[in-house]
Amino acid sequence: MRSLIPGNSQRVRQTAPNVFGKFVEAEQYTKQEICELVGSDPSGEKLYVVLDKFAMHLAFRETTKGALLSKNPVASYFGNVKNDLLELYLSLEAVSGRRLHNIASVLDKYCSKRDTDFTHQAPPCTKNDLRVLSTTLLKHAAVPEDYKDYALLNLLWYLLGRSSDTLCLMKNQVAVYPGEY
Protein backbone atom coordinates (compact mmCIF):
# COMPACT_ATOMS: atom_id res chain seq x y z
CA MET A 1 0.00 0.00 0.00
CA ARG A 2 2.86 2.42 0.81
CA SER A 3 4.16 2.09 -2.72
CA LEU A 4 0.97 3.78 -3.98
CA ILE A 5 1.57 6.91 -1.88
CA PRO A 6 3.59 9.61 -3.68
CA GLY A 7 7.11 10.22 -2.36
CA ASN A 8 6.38 13.80 -1.32
CA SER A 9 3.45 12.68 0.83
CA GLN A 10 5.63 10.09 2.56
CA ARG A 11 8.30 12.71 3.29
CA VAL A 12 5.70 15.09 4.70
CA ARG A 13 4.30 12.32 6.92
CA GLN A 14 7.82 11.80 8.28
CA THR A 15 8.73 15.50 8.54
CA ALA A 16 5.51 16.77 10.16
CA PRO A 17 6.19 15.12 13.55
CA ASN A 18 9.70 16.60 13.53
CA VAL A 19 8.32 20.09 12.86
CA PHE A 20 5.76 19.59 15.62
CA GLY A 21 8.55 18.44 17.93
CA LYS A 22 10.50 21.64 17.25
CA PHE A 23 7.36 23.66 17.96
CA VAL A 24 6.82 21.82 21.24
CA GLU A 25 10.44 22.49 22.25
CA ALA A 26 10.05 26.17 21.38
CA GLU A 27 7.02 26.28 23.69
CA GLN A 28 9.18 24.63 26.40
CA TYR A 29 7.14 21.44 26.66
CA THR A 30 7.68 17.83 25.71
CA LYS A 31 5.50 15.82 23.34
CA GLN A 32 4.45 13.66 26.28
CA GLU A 33 3.30 16.72 28.27
CA ILE A 34 1.31 17.99 25.29
CA CYS A 35 -0.33 14.58 24.85
CA GLU A 36 -1.25 14.44 28.54
CA LEU A 37 -2.59 17.99 28.39
CA VAL A 38 -4.75 17.29 25.33
CA GLY A 39 -5.90 13.91 26.64
CA SER A 40 -7.02 15.35 29.97
CA ASP A 41 -9.49 17.76 28.35
CA PRO A 42 -12.67 16.11 27.00
CA SER A 43 -13.97 19.46 25.68
CA GLY A 44 -11.22 19.67 23.04
CA GLU A 45 -10.33 23.23 24.06
CA LYS A 46 -6.70 22.39 24.83
CA LEU A 47 -6.31 20.58 21.51
CA TYR A 48 -7.69 23.67 19.79
CA VAL A 49 -5.23 25.95 21.61
CA VAL A 50 -2.25 23.70 20.85
CA LEU A 51 -3.11 23.44 17.16
CA ASP A 52 -3.87 27.16 16.93
CA LYS A 53 -0.42 27.97 18.30
CA PHE A 54 1.11 25.37 15.99
CA ALA A 55 -0.62 27.03 13.03
CA MET A 56 0.88 30.38 14.03
CA HIS A 57 4.27 28.71 14.37
CA LEU A 58 3.98 27.29 10.85
CA ALA A 59 2.74 30.54 9.35
CA PHE A 60 5.87 32.36 10.50
CA ARG A 61 8.38 29.51 10.27
CA GLU A 62 11.38 30.23 8.10
CA THR A 63 13.32 27.79 5.99
CA THR A 64 17.08 27.43 6.31
CA LYS A 65 17.43 30.03 3.56
CA GLY A 66 15.41 32.59 5.51
CA ALA A 67 12.20 32.45 3.44
CA LEU A 68 8.82 31.63 4.92
CA LEU A 69 7.44 28.15 4.31
CA SER A 70 5.18 28.03 1.29
CA LYS A 71 1.48 27.24 1.46
CA ASN A 72 1.68 23.54 0.61
CA PRO A 73 4.16 22.44 3.30
CA VAL A 74 2.34 24.54 5.90
CA ALA A 75 -1.00 22.94 5.02
CA SER A 76 0.53 19.45 4.87
CA TYR A 77 2.36 19.72 8.19
CA PHE A 78 -0.69 21.13 9.94
CA GLY A 79 -3.02 18.53 8.45
CA ASN A 80 -0.75 15.62 9.33
CA VAL A 81 -0.22 16.75 12.92
CA LYS A 82 -3.95 17.44 13.34
CA ASN A 83 -4.82 13.98 12.00
CA ASP A 84 -2.18 12.30 14.18
CA LEU A 85 -3.54 13.97 17.31
CA LEU A 86 -7.14 13.16 16.38
CA GLU A 87 -6.14 9.52 15.81
CA LEU A 88 -4.76 9.44 19.35
CA TYR A 89 -7.89 11.06 20.81
CA LEU A 90 -10.83 9.82 18.75
CA SER A 91 -13.40 11.32 21.12
CA LEU A 92 -12.18 14.85 20.32
CA GLU A 93 -13.00 14.56 16.61
CA ALA A 94 -16.71 15.20 17.10
CA VAL A 95 -16.16 17.91 19.70
CA SER A 96 -13.56 20.01 17.91
CA GLY A 97 -13.58 18.93 14.26
CA ARG A 98 -15.29 22.05 12.91
CA ARG A 99 -13.10 24.44 14.91
CA LEU A 100 -9.94 22.68 13.75
CA HIS A 101 -11.13 22.85 10.16
CA ASN A 102 -11.62 26.59 10.66
CA ILE A 103 -7.99 26.95 11.80
CA ALA A 104 -6.84 25.06 8.71
CA SER A 105 -8.87 27.24 6.34
CA VAL A 106 -7.68 30.49 7.96
CA LEU A 107 -4.08 29.25 7.79
CA ASP A 108 -4.54 28.31 4.14
CA LYS A 109 -6.02 31.72 3.26
CA TYR A 110 -3.27 33.54 5.14
CA CYS A 111 -0.50 31.60 3.41
CA SER A 112 -2.14 32.20 0.03
CA LYS A 113 -2.29 35.96 0.52
CA ARG A 114 1.00 36.67 2.25
CA ASP A 115 3.12 36.40 -0.89
CA THR A 116 0.91 38.61 -3.03
CA ASP A 117 0.12 42.28 -3.21
CA PHE A 118 -3.61 41.63 -3.20
CA THR A 119 -4.12 42.28 0.50
CA HIS A 120 -6.23 45.33 1.11
CA GLN A 121 -5.62 47.69 3.97
CA ALA A 122 -8.39 49.63 5.61
CA PRO A 123 -8.89 53.06 4.12
CA PRO A 124 -7.27 55.80 6.18
CA CYS A 125 -9.60 57.58 8.54
CA THR A 126 -9.90 61.32 8.34
CA LYS A 127 -9.96 63.88 11.09
CA ASN A 128 -13.72 63.92 10.67
CA ASP A 129 -13.81 60.19 11.52
CA LEU A 130 -11.68 60.87 14.58
CA ARG A 131 -14.06 63.66 15.59
CA VAL A 132 -17.05 61.29 15.35
CA LEU A 133 -15.30 58.63 17.46
CA SER A 134 -14.20 61.21 20.03
CA THR A 135 -17.65 62.79 20.25
CA THR A 136 -19.23 59.39 20.80
CA LEU A 137 -16.76 58.59 23.58
CA LEU A 138 -17.36 61.93 25.28
CA LYS A 139 -21.17 61.74 25.02
CA HIS A 140 -21.25 58.37 26.76
CA ALA A 141 -18.50 59.05 29.30
CA ALA A 142 -19.60 57.95 32.76
CA VAL A 143 -16.36 57.52 34.71
CA PRO A 144 -12.94 59.20 34.60
CA GLU A 145 -11.50 56.22 32.70
CA ASP A 146 -13.75 57.10 29.75
CA TYR A 147 -11.95 60.41 29.46
CA LYS A 148 -8.64 58.54 29.52
CA ASP A 149 -9.94 56.44 26.63
CA TYR A 150 -10.74 59.64 24.75
CA ALA A 151 -7.24 60.98 25.37
CA LEU A 152 -5.63 57.67 24.37
CA LEU A 153 -7.67 57.51 21.17
CA ASN A 154 -6.50 60.95 20.11
CA LEU A 155 -2.91 60.33 21.14
CA LEU A 156 -2.70 56.99 19.37
CA TRP A 157 -4.39 58.37 16.26
CA TYR A 158 -1.74 61.01 15.94
CA LEU A 159 1.05 58.54 16.76
CA LEU A 160 -0.14 55.83 14.39
CA GLY A 161 -1.56 58.15 11.77
CA ARG A 162 -4.83 56.29 11.28
CA SER A 163 -7.65 55.92 13.73
CA SER A 164 -8.66 52.65 12.07
CA ASP A 165 -5.41 51.18 13.44
CA THR A 166 -6.37 52.14 16.98
CA LEU A 167 -9.59 50.15 16.70
CA CYS A 168 -7.47 46.98 16.45
CA LEU A 169 -5.86 47.61 19.83
CA MET A 170 -7.19 45.79 22.84
CA LYS A 171 -8.11 47.91 25.82
CA ASN A 172 -5.70 46.02 28.07
CA GLN A 173 -2.84 47.00 25.73
CA VAL A 174 -3.36 50.70 26.46
CA ALA A 175 -5.03 50.58 29.87
CA VAL A 176 -3.59 52.51 32.80
CA TYR A 177 -3.54 50.34 35.89
CA PRO A 178 -3.45 51.64 39.47
CA GLY A 179 0.06 52.51 40.56
CA GLU A 180 1.44 52.52 37.00
CA TYR A 181 2.18 55.82 35.28
Image: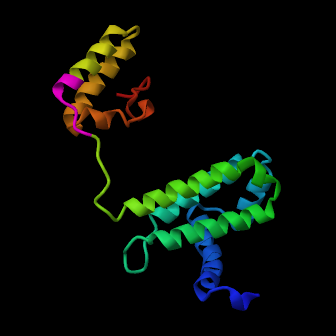
Q: Position of residue 160 (x, y in %)?
A: 23, 39
Which residue shows up at 79% across the image and 64% down it? 88
Q: Quadrant of residue 118?
A: bottom left
Which residue shows up at 40% across the image and 70% down it? 68
Residue most extreme to the right: 91
Which residue shows up at 57% across the image and 53% down it? 103
Tell me the quarter of the image containing the C terminus: top left
Question: What segment is highlighted magenta in the picture?
Answer: 123-129
Tell me the quarter of the image containing the N terminus: bottom right
Tell me: 24 left or right of 34.
left
Q: Position of residue 33 (x, y in %)?
A: 73, 61
Q: Position of residue 131 (x, y in %)?
A: 21, 19
Tell me: 106 left or right of 42.
left
Q: Is residue 22 above or below residue 4?
A: above
Q: Quadrant of residue 169?
A: top left
Residue most extreme to the front: 4
What count of labels does the image hold?
0
Which residue shows up at 29% across the image and 26% down it? 152
Q: Is residue 138 above or below residue 173?
A: above
Q: Position of residue 85 (x, y in %)?
A: 73, 63
Color style of the picture: rainbow
Residue most extreme to the bottom: 3
Q: Residue 177 or 9: which is nearer the viewer?
A: 9
Q: Is residue 8 above or below residue 147?
A: below
- 101 drawn magenta: no
- 126 drawn magenta: yes
Tell me: 117 left or right of 102.
left
